[in-house]
Image (cartoon, rainbow, N blue to C red):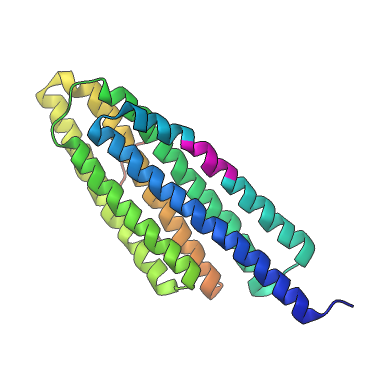
Amino acid sequence: MPNSEHIVSSFDRDLEGIQAKIMRLGGLVEEAITKSVQALESRDLDLAKTVRRADKAIDELEEQVNVDAARIIALRQPIASDLRTVLTVFRVSANLERIGDYAKNIAKRSQSVIELETVPGTAASLKRMARQVELMLKDVLDAYIQHDADLAEDVRQRDLEVDQMYSALFREYLTHMMEDPRHITACMHLHFMAKNIERMGDHVTSVAEQVIYLVTGVMPDDDRPKEDKTPYVHEA
C-alpha cells in the first residue's frame, strides 16, 4: 500500500506546478492588458498585432493548466478541501483566458481606431480604466496564492469603481459623437473597447469569488457591486 505521506507530498508538488502556471498565465494576461491599451495610446499597429498573436500563448497555457488539473483528479482522487483547490484551478484559469480574449479584442479594435482621426483624451481615459483592472488582477492573484479571502473581497468591491469609470466613458463618447459626427466611428470602437475592459473587471471579480470559496468553502451569497446597466452585444 502506498505511503500516505508520499501521496500527500506528490499531490503538493503537482499542485505547486499548476499554481506556478496560473501565475505565469496571470502575468501574460496582465501584459496583454497593458500592451493592448498602449498600442492605442501610442498608435502602434505593430504592438497591436503582437498582442493579438500573443493570445495563442495564453490559450495554450490555459489548456496545459486544465490538463494538469484533470490529471491530478484522475491520479490523486483529492477530497474535501484538496478537491476544492483543484476545482478552483479550472475556474481561475478560464477567467484569466477570457480576460486575455478581451485584451485581444481591444488590440484588434486599436488597429481600426489608429487609422481614424484622434478623439482627444479618450486613449488616456481608457488607459486609466485598464490600469484599475490590472491592479485588481495583481491583487487577486496575490490573494489566490496567499489564500487571503479579505484581499479577495476587497478586489470584489473595487469592481464598482470600474463600472463607474465605464459609465463616465460611455457618456464622454456620446458627447464626442454629438459634438462632431466625424468621431462617431472612432467612438463606437472606443465604446466597445471600454466595455471589454469593464468585462475584464467582471472576470477578475469572478476570480476573487473563487478565492473566497477556496478559503472559506462558501461562495459569496450577496450580489456583487454593480453599476453598469447599459446594453451590450457580446464580442468573443
Q: Is residue 46 left or right of residue 206?
A: left
Q: List x then y, in percent, for residue 163.
A: 29, 50
Identify whether 194 is placed above or below 75. above
Q: How many marks?
A: 0
Foreground residue among 148 and 233: 148
* Residue at (26% x, 47% y) in the render: 129
Q: Is residue 171 left or right of residue 193?
A: left
Foreground residue among 185 and 132: 132
Q: Quadrant of residue 156?
A: bottom left
* Residue at (49% x, 38% y) in the render: 55
Tell which residue pokes out farthest to the left in this image.
Answer: 179
Q: List x then y, in percent, for residue 134.
A: 34, 53
Q: Is residue 136 left or right of residue 56?
A: left
Q: Quadrant of residue 151?
A: bottom left
Tell which residue pokes out farthest to the right in this image.
Answer: 1
Q: What span is in magenta?
A: 54-60
Q: Quadrant of residue 89?
A: bottom right
Which quadrant does the N terminus fall into?
bottom right
Q: Which secondary structure type mostly characterizes the magenta part of the structure?
A: helix
* Residue at (55% x, 41% y) in the render: 59
Please tell me whether residue 145 belongs to the stretch shown in magenta.
Answer: no
Foreground residue among 106 and 40: 40
Q: List x then y, in percent, for residue 38.
A: 28, 39
Q: List x then y, in percent, for residue 86.
A: 64, 63
Instruction: Say if residue 227 shows up in the picture.
Output: no
Instruction: Say if residue 51 shows up in the picture.
Output: yes
Q: Is residue 219 left or right of residue 42?
A: right
* Residue at (67% x, 65% y) in the render: 14
Identify whether 142 is placed above or below 204. below
